[in-house]
Image (spheres, grey):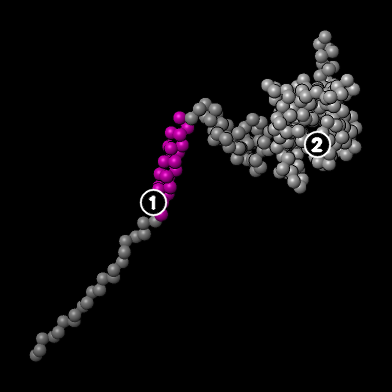
Amino acid sequence: MEEEQQPIVVVKKSGKHGGHHGGSWKVAYADFVTALMAFFLVMWLVNQEQAVKEAVQGYFNDPANYGKMEGSSSILPGGASIFDSDVPPPKQPTGEAALKEALEKAGNQLQVELAKIPGFDVIKEHVHVEMIPEGLRIQLIEAASKDDDSSYFFDLGSARLSGKGVQILTVIGKELSGLDNKIVVEGHTDSKKFHYKERYSNWELSADRANSARKLLEEKSIKPGQIYAIRGYADNSPMIANNPADARNRRIAIVVLAHDPGEEAKEVAISE
């Protein structure tokens, strides 16, 4: 009798992994990074000036209202408050600085407008626009050199304006009419004498040229009362000081005063 066969039992083990570790490590890592950031922030703050420390303290004490407090500013130098959505406008100059800036702007704009005149390049060296202590000065210089007997803005030896003189003064008047400043018109000559000096001299010529310029400025655009004075210096205030006979001393000067001469006269009277 054959031996009874034993059944074969096969045991299969399922390959199961260990339990899930979870996300606790992420929380620990985040805490570590936060602590590290706080550490570096403290190290940075320790080395800052007292004003920066007080600014940081003020922000953390009341972050909602700190940016709205008067005198509050950014923690970092040169920055604005984090609550300010708009960059504050730059401070506008006041007093003498504002007057000077306005005159400089007018002088620059005048040069732009003069450059638009056809043929101005030929005579631009005869027109000087500059700032002086009294204000803005525009000089129309008759001669290009000491030996030049030509006359660009007036007829030679006369107070009658040339066509170019009328054109230049018209542009000058238009630009200056936008200002409220008082204007002084000066006439200057060289030291050469007239042959008939008993009847007409450099005194009359300098004053008459200044007055002719004044009349044209007022006819074209200058506001009534804006011209404060006309002055005839003859040859007593030469541009070429070491050579009064230099032809370049023949000129008129339009001075836009930075200060009201009437107010200055009142101050002098009060002080006396």
Q: Main secondary structure of the magenta part?
A: helix
The local secondary structure at tag 1 comes to: helix
| Image quadrant in which the N terminus is located | bottom left
Residue 164: image quadrant is: top right
Q: Position of residue 125 (x, y in %)?
A: 70, 37
In front of the other: 171 or 109:
171
Residue depicted at x 77% and y 30% = 251
Residue extent of the magenta highlight:
23-47
| Image quadrant in which the C terminus is located | top right
The answer to whether the residue labelled 2 contacts the one labelled 1, judged by CB atoms less than 8 Å apart, is: no
Please give the residue where the numbered disc 1 appears in the rendered image. Answer: 25
Please give the residue where the numbered disc 2 appears in the rendered image. Answer: 153
Residue depicted at x 74% and y 27% = 249
Identity, as a three-letter code, of the amino acid under mark 2: Phe
Disc 2 or 1, which lies upstream in sequence?
Answer: 1
Tell me if mark 2 has few (under 14), some (14-19) or many (20+) residues whose alpha carbon lies within 10 angstroms of its own.
many
In the rendered image, the residue lying farthest to the top is 272
Asked if residue 38 is among those painted magenta in the image, a careful observer would answer: yes
